[in-house]
Amino acid sequence: MISIKSSREIALMKEAGQYNMATFRELEKHLKVGITTKELDKIAHDFIIKNGCVPSCLGYEGYPASICISINDEVVHGIPSKRKIKNGDIVSIDLVLAYKGYHADATRTYIIGDVSKEVEDLVKNTRLAFFEGVKQVKDGARVKDISIAIEKYAHDHGLSVVEELCGHGIGLEMHEEPDIPNFNDNNNTRLKEGMVIAIEPMLNLGSKEVYVLDDDWTVKTVDGKPSSHYENTVLVTKDGYEILTGDD
Ligand code: MF3
Ligand code: CO
């Protein structure tokens, strides 16, 4: 069942989106060489709670932290630890919070200091792939219109698409129907005004193959090459869309 949000629910999801963005602004003040990912997790956790929200990932299927921090060849679901951020890292922060029961989900990948041109382009193009996908969104469009646009943009820019993970509907649950893949799996489901979805391309510089570490969470690229992730929570409207978690 795909949920259609009422105007009251949409207003709450917009507020959740604002709190999500504010948490990123707080994290950005601290995201520097030398800080540990666990310190960033605590900053996010405390800020989310202070704002009367709930960190959705904490305890989700046993996940042990409030946010996911995935560095370089880590694709998603990196667990905050004593690892320090280094010059030349690319750092993805995936942040889901709930306000009055409604979740907002967003991811940003940050370039720390000096990286190669190809890594810089990987990060930029992952963000731009999101915008190619979101441009397809409007009442009556199909899920695969988003998937095809993201996949084409990735391939046109020499990047591969992770297939094991995808975007999703979002609302009272963090993961709702429909799935929003980043490659064409021919999903003809129609989007409807009032749906809210998270669109989240995960693109690799090398091959698309990934595996899960022994910690049962961290997803890494098989070839050890970097991966980038960009995500926003998006409301489907009659003529288009509204991004609830910003476009930075
Ligand atoms: N944005 C991530 C997702 O959609 C959030 C994962 S939270 C975790 O899968 F608890 F599963 F890590
Ligand atoms: Co998500």
Image: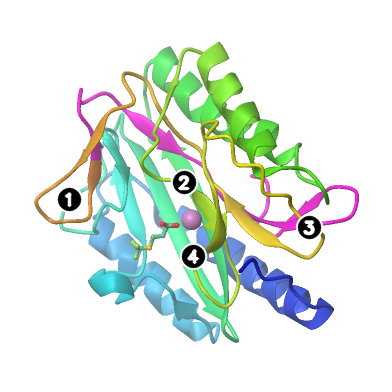
Determine the CA span between mark 1 and mark 4: 29 Å
Q: Does residue 218 appear left or right of residue 94 in this picture?
A: left
Q: Nearer the viewer, mark 2 or mark 1?
A: 2
| Residue position for label 4 | 175
Q: Does residue 161 appear left or right of residue 142 in this picture?
A: left
Viewer-closest of 79 and 172 = 172
Task: Residue type at mark 2: give it.
Answer: Cys
Measured as percent of width and height from the top left, residue 3 is found at 67, 71
Q: Quadrant of the N terminus?
A: bottom right
- First in sequence: mark 2 or mark 1? 1
Report the residue at 55% width, 82% height from top: 51
Task: Give the secondary structure at mark 2.
Answer: loop
Please say whether residue 73 is visible from this viewpoint: yes
Report the residue at 40% width, 45% height from top: 165
Answer few, some or many: residues within 10 Å of disc 1's Cα (few below 14, many 20 plus, some between 14 and 19). Answer: some
- First in sequence: mark 4 or mark 2? 2
Q: Quadrant of residue 188?
A: top right
**Label at residue 83:** 1
